[in-house]
Image: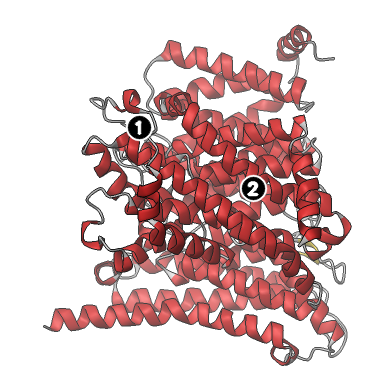
Amino acid sequence: MTRLAPTMPYIVILLICGFLYYQAELIAPAGEGRLGADFWPKAILIAAMVTCAWEAVRKARIGARREARATPLSLDAVEEGKPQGEQKVPEYVPWVGIALTVAYALAMPWLGYFLASILFVAAFVYAGNFRRPLVAACVAIAASTAFMFLFMRVVYVSLPIGVEPFAWISTSLMRLMGVK
Amino acid sequence: METLINHLAVGFTHVFHAYNLLMLTIGLLIGMAVSIMPGLGLVMGIVLTLPFTYTMEIEPSIILLTAIYIAGTYGGCFTAILYKIPGEPSDVPLLWDGYNMNLKGQAAKALGWALVAALIGGLVSSTIMVSLAGPFAKFALTFDSPDYFAIIVLGLATVVCLATTSLAHAFVSLFFGLILATVGIDTTYGAERFTFGGSLLSGGINYVTVLVGAYGLGEVFTRFGHTLKVEADSDAPGRVQTQFPSWREIWELRHTISRSTVLGTILGVVPGAGAVITSFVAYGIEKQYCKRSDELGSGIPEGIVAPQIASTASVAGHMVPLLALGIPGSAATAVILGAFLLHGVQPGPQIFVANPETAYAILASLFVGVVGMCLIGYFWIRLVVKVLRIPQPIIIAIVVLFCIVGTYAERASFADVGMVIAFGIVGYLFERFGFPVAPMVLGAILGPLAETSFMRSMIRYESDWTVFFSRPISCTFLVLAIVAFLFPVISRMRQQRSVALAAGR
């Protein structure tokens, strides 16, 4: 089972490609002797499936450990390398960031851009290992206000104002900034 | 030649318009700042600035993004030399000699060498490439759809082969990007593909969401919770000053300078070989041919000059094929291509015919950008280096705001915001499992161009596959693509063989 673990990502991708290939079969075909709209995606999917199958078999045969030993250092090892002086974080931590970002996007239509951004920045900064709540709150207010000004007053982009009673805060701030 | 100088002169007058010059300066400052911050990088800088260009004219927006690109190849040298922190992966070779010169008490001299190298590399490479741009575009006008298809295949091949440790991972990433590009209504037949009966995907997947998600949010999620510690005892900020080498010292390094400039320019033209590859290759070449190769790595100017010249020289090398052929050779130029397309302009040989003022203004901005970057580097770097003191969680929270609001700004659509978060998660998972992001992004951008050229060739030549090999231009590019595919496979097999031989011994 441990031996098969490194093959799992490829098997998952292989299954997804298989499903998409089935979907590609539903694309309206072209006339006799001509390549239709389904040809290009099918060709890509076949190439992807062959690559995944090849890699899955290879991983299963060699085993991840041996491969890691045999893989020579290349430019990408440095390219993917992290800056010095960084500490490792537990695996769940990035998912906290993802969850906060999803919550931010979901809250924005209700709370409006300004309030949602303040809450998001404060929570994101705090959860991101910055343990100075007052500074985090000040940064959140400053960043949200600055972004609102930048986008609504300089770039003329309309941002969500939210629903009442939150919309009142957004519109008041907009009035203060001179946004009509 | 006279026409070129005339066009370039007009280009310079466009660049020196107050608004364009302002955008260029802002771009240089952004480029400096993002390249100093580890984890941000010049590509993310360009991606995050992209939404601000929606309401701009084409000229200032491309000048802004190009300035970020140029400055992004230089700004990181400060943190590499002073703090041993490579702001960009292309700055890693600068650590070896730059930081060692700093330890010897020659930080100002090391910074001076980096500045001179960036200036020479940028100006010489821009001169070479700008003079080649016209003939390049004229030659490209003779291209037919099979030739374009072959060039795109070569571009994708080199991106896949140069940018990764695992060829299979790079291929999977590329295929994922190409599949993303097929979602929506097919442009040749008008058939719906992978829309799953809904309206959300019928307009296709906006590549800006792929770019912002995979590069911006993906990197943010990867870095979330990390804290970067700059050496507390470092008195480097006090040493942030630049001491120029003398003319004699520069003359003594003439061989290194010429080797690295030529190498950077040539490698810049090769699709996929970005600033990272060029700076490493230039350092490697110095290691072989430099007179003091034994001392390389101990803190000598050659180790700073070679990678810095090559990475800055690669910018012009990348920009000219983008303008003349419409094909981006790096992630940064892929985003710039995206900016062109957002403004309804398809870069390619026609741009030199239909809109030479814009084309040459962008080329002229390369020269002005290089000089401006060095001036900022010399005078204002103390300020720019201070961005390092901003805590990482604050920076990445602001990056998320940029990504989310920037995406929303394009079409005022929450569906786009959802999409960008989804691609952020994909970008994080790619990073987590060692799949490179660049092939996916280039696949998503170049996919439609590749498919259109392919289908056009098939329709025009009645599904005759041999057309790709019977035309000299397309055949040459396809052979080069095959070589690009085979090169890493063969070199890996050779390395594995030598490892096995060494183990047997």
Q: Is residue A61 left or right of residue A154?
A: left
Amino acid type, label 2: Leu
Q: Position of residue A120 (x, y in %)?
A: 55, 24
Residue at which label 2 appears? B366
Residue B184 sits in quarter: bottom right
Quick check: B46 above or below B17?
Answer: below
Q: Secondary structure at mark 1?
A: loop
Q: Between marks 1 and 2, how big is the CA–CA gap?
A: 35 Å
Q: Which residue is mark 1?
A: B227
Which subunit holds the residue at mark 1? Answer: B
Chain under label 2?
Answer: B
As drawn, the residue found furthest toward the front would be B248
Using residue B238 as the reference point, say whether residue B475 is left or right of it. right
| Residue B445 can be seen in this image | no
Q: Quadrant of residue B110?
A: top left
Compared to residue B282, the image places residue B19 above or below, namely above
Viewer-closest of A172 and B62: B62
Q: Residue at x 21, y 61 (%)?
A: B294
Q: Residues within 10 Å of mark 2 (few under 14, many from 20)?
A: many
x and y percent of residue B240 in the render?
37, 28
Q: Nearer the viewer, residue A19 or B151?
A: B151
Q: Secondary structure at mark 2?
A: helix
Kind of residue indicated by mark 1:
Thr
Does residue B22 appear left or right of residue A128 in this picture? Answer: right
